[in-house]
Amino acid sequence: LLDNHSYLTGDVLLSSGTVAYLGAFTVDYRLECQKQWQVLCKEKHIPCSNDFSLSNTLGDPVKIRAWQIAGLPVDSFSVDNGIIVSNSRRWALMIDPQRQANKWIKNMEKANKLSVIKLSDTNYVRILENAIQFGTPVLLENIGEELDAFIEPILLKLTFKQQGVEYMRLGENIIEYSRDFKFYMTTRLRNPHYFPEVAVKVCLLNFMITPLGLQDQLLGIVAAKEKPELEEKKNKLIIESAANKKQLKEIEDKILEVLSKSEGNILEDETAIKVLSSSKELSEEISEKQEIASVTEMQIDATRMGYKPVAVHSATLFFCISDLANIEPMYQYSLIWFINLYIQSIANSKKSDDLKERIENIIEHFTVSIYNNVCRSLFEKDKLLFSLLLTIGIMKGEDKIDDEVWRFLLTGGVALDNPYLNPAPEWLTDKSWAEIVRASSLKNHHGLMDHVRENVSKWKMIYDSAKPQEEAFPDVWKTLVGLDRMIILRCLRPDKIIPATQDFITENMGRTYIEPPTFDLVGSYNDSNCCAPLIFVLSPGADPMAGLLKFADDLGMGGTSIQTISLGQGQGPIAAKMICQAIIDGTWVVLQNCHLATSWMPALEKICEEMIVPENTHEKFRLWLTSYPSEKFPVSILQNGIKMTNEPPKGVRANLLRSYLNDPVSDPAFFTSCQKQEMWQKLLFGLCFFHALVQERKNFGPLGWNIPYEFNESDLRISMRQIQMFLNEYEEIPFEALTYLTGECNYGGRVTDDKDRRLLLSLLSIVYNKDIEQEKYKLSPGDDYYIPPHGPYQSYIDYLRSLPIATHPEVFGLHENADITKDNQETNQLFSGVLLTLPRQVGGGGKSPQETVEDLARDILSKLPNDFNLEAVMKKYPVLYEESMNTVLRQELIRFNRWGSLFSLTLQKLKDAKMFVFMISTRSQALDNCKHFVINFIYKSYLRADSKYLKAAANDFLNPDGQLSDSNNI
């Protein structure tokens, strides 16, 4: 107690700083600031605790336990948040994307008649006025980045006294102000940008869930499902323990009160003696109960902790999927949705009496469930990226990933120049050689640069290989595995990173995670309920309406039972009426193109939250939405809805599988509907193969099509129907008519370039010809792709699943080198996507991202050339009629000098204010301040720890084609 008292000054100072300034920051940054403040306190000789914590200084254990019972996560970060809320002089605005703070406030203030409002409510002003007068708490939910001016007097606590009574002016009304009034605000935005004038009026609090807090929640859920009696007993003990501690605190307060009021000799005060003796008995009784409860709780915890691996693994998965929102605004997933999947996996996974086996079963089932559910809402370009994030996230949790190696794989390292001479410039690019040099500084790659220099011919064999990812590396390097092996591949053949990534995922997670599930409308519908909207996230060329209308007919919801409306100006109120009626009647409503009605989206969000609730909604009702990706789309709808993408899958195998697993081919009646069964199925397979070819050729850019075309499912469907019709109506197959209809009308109708039309007809001639009647007719060079023998529907599916995942360019009629550009683009896209999900700071060895960029900035500054002397240039190269190029030279030098000044100024500012730039919270804030692209490079470098942008800009500037590198030569 004496020690605590002596440190009180410094601890209270640190606590005040934390409450006032650190609420909006992450746990790591809070701790870093507190450590720096402790050092400053000691330098100024202000006594403070070595192990300072906010909960030890300002926390009340009884109150904290009550908060945790009300739903506050148990980790220290969340406890500190609770302390800040209760101690701050300003009202709390909580950044709460997972609704943790929302749940806690509602439970904590339930007994105090909490009012829950939104700024979109029509009566929120009246509710606020009543709460202020009667002293009841108010929770303002789902606020955006701007606050209504009406609540400003509440935020600033602008009260005045009149005849001894405290009043507040709200709008035009003057109302009595009760000191018992409490005001809480929450936002669902993950990374909101509040202007300074808003931030200074509220206490900003970061309530993003922490790994420890989530692990505890998930552990409680799995224990409750697996050992319900134990979890019930533990919860009972927690409540009893809280009540006992509260009673002990009351006893202590009572004793202190008696002692303070007692006059004279306390031994002569009979009332005081009675109070003290009864308090002692009660205290001893409670202490005994507490000891028994503590022993029981320890025993329960020991059993409960057996399931901890499930909780740790599942928490890792949640943070993997929560990072996806940085890639695409539509990739939003709520904690409630995640926990529901978690509970389903516990219930549906294989049971076992052996705890270890049971844990493995839950983990495996839940991981696959998360993968399948998230994949259906991702665009094709992001499915492999998600698999990689899952794999790396899980391996990091098991401490199998070196952060430095992982970061190098994504960025290629950072350096401004390379002092080592390229040993094989005829085939090894300078970029690749520079990466090899930088890779040699990694722990498992020491000596790589020297080995490449001394064994150029051995490494050239790897470089020239068609499948370098499968080759054994020379000498000692053949033992490298995993990310270490991929780093060498990145240096030599970055175009083969995608297949290498697939191999890496397969080795560590299994083949399931590189074979995303095909579009499944039935499965998505089965996972939905009347209150969860189903959202089609659109991509160019995708039109889900035909499939949706067919599905509605199959379920008996066609015709008048499904209403569709395309949103746009003035359509919002009509859509709202449709929804209100459909909720009662139990019909379906389809709102198309939500991205075109961004101003109506808040109204839709309100309808989903307030009207589409279980007690008011018919169980058959469904709300279907279609939208292109939009930052204005309501986060709450995205988090609680079932999201689906409906774009062509990547690869011929996946494309063929999709055609066969979706309507109409998957319909047995359609598949067997033709009179000439054998020929029908051969032509059907050939047409699906042709459809896959024309879709996939888009990925090759101008090598695939001169102009990219959006061929879609409707082209395939109509062509199938025509084959069926001609086979039924003609004895001989009219290949010319089929070729014309398919090649000139259905698919050809989209084609505008004459060379593309000729190509389309050439591709179609592969399948629309008499040779297709042959057994195992080959559709491409090699033995992989052919028309399977006539058989049942399942035999075709089995054949398609046996096809290779990656498609060789020869299948498309292209040279084997045609996919190098395409593969390089895919590699860059993969790494760029992953970098967007990475935190600004990472652990591990080596320099921090800030230090790396700062060193790079210093290096660039030292290499910047002097400005050109324009007067000397004008004398030597005057602007004459006979020498018109001198004018161009002068203009270029003026521009060069401007860029030099900009680089120098920007880099100097970066050095002087690196922490300020690093702490900028949002991209928009950075871009508002940084008008030039160079600063944007620097910002990206900080945000993504990826200094290659800055490095590339500097290299381009310092050596523009090598012509202006030395001003003395002019």
Image: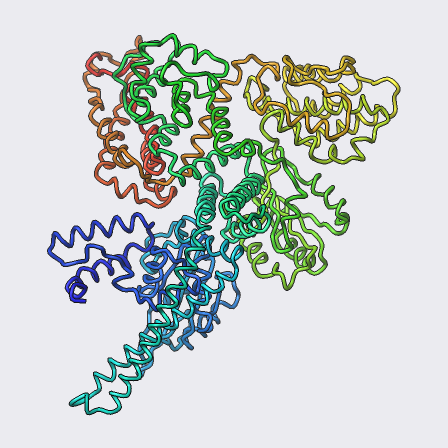
Image quarter in which the N terminus is found: bottom left
Choose between 848 and 876: the one closer to the eye.
848
Residue 205: quarter of image:
bottom left
Residue 279 against residue 736 in the figure, above or below: below
Q: What residue is at 72 percent from the left and 43 percent from the top?
A: 551
Q: How many marks?
A: 0
**Which residue occupies the foreground of this view, 814 or 512?**
512
* Residue 831 drawn above or below residue 117: above
- Location of residue 356 with respect to 908 vertically, above or below: below
Asked if residue 544 shows in the view, the reply is yes
Task: Please state which of residues 709 and 325 is positioned toward the viewer in this rendering.
Answer: 325
Horizontal placement of 738 versus 390: left or right?
right
The reply, left or right, for residue 460 in relation to residue 667 is left
Residue 819 in percent (x, y) is at: 52, 18
Left or right, 963 with reference to 190 = left
Would you identify the image quadrant in which residue 130 lies? Answer: bottom left
| Residue 949: % across, % down | 35, 29
Q: Based on the displayed image, in which of its 4 quarters is residue 937 positioned?
A: top left
Give the image location of residue 864, x and y in percent. Answer: 22, 24
Image point (29%, 14%), residue name: 450
Residue under the image location 47 percent in, 41 percent down? 324
**Residue furthest to the front:** 354
On screen, residue 340 above or below 887: below
Q: Is residue 601 visible?
A: no
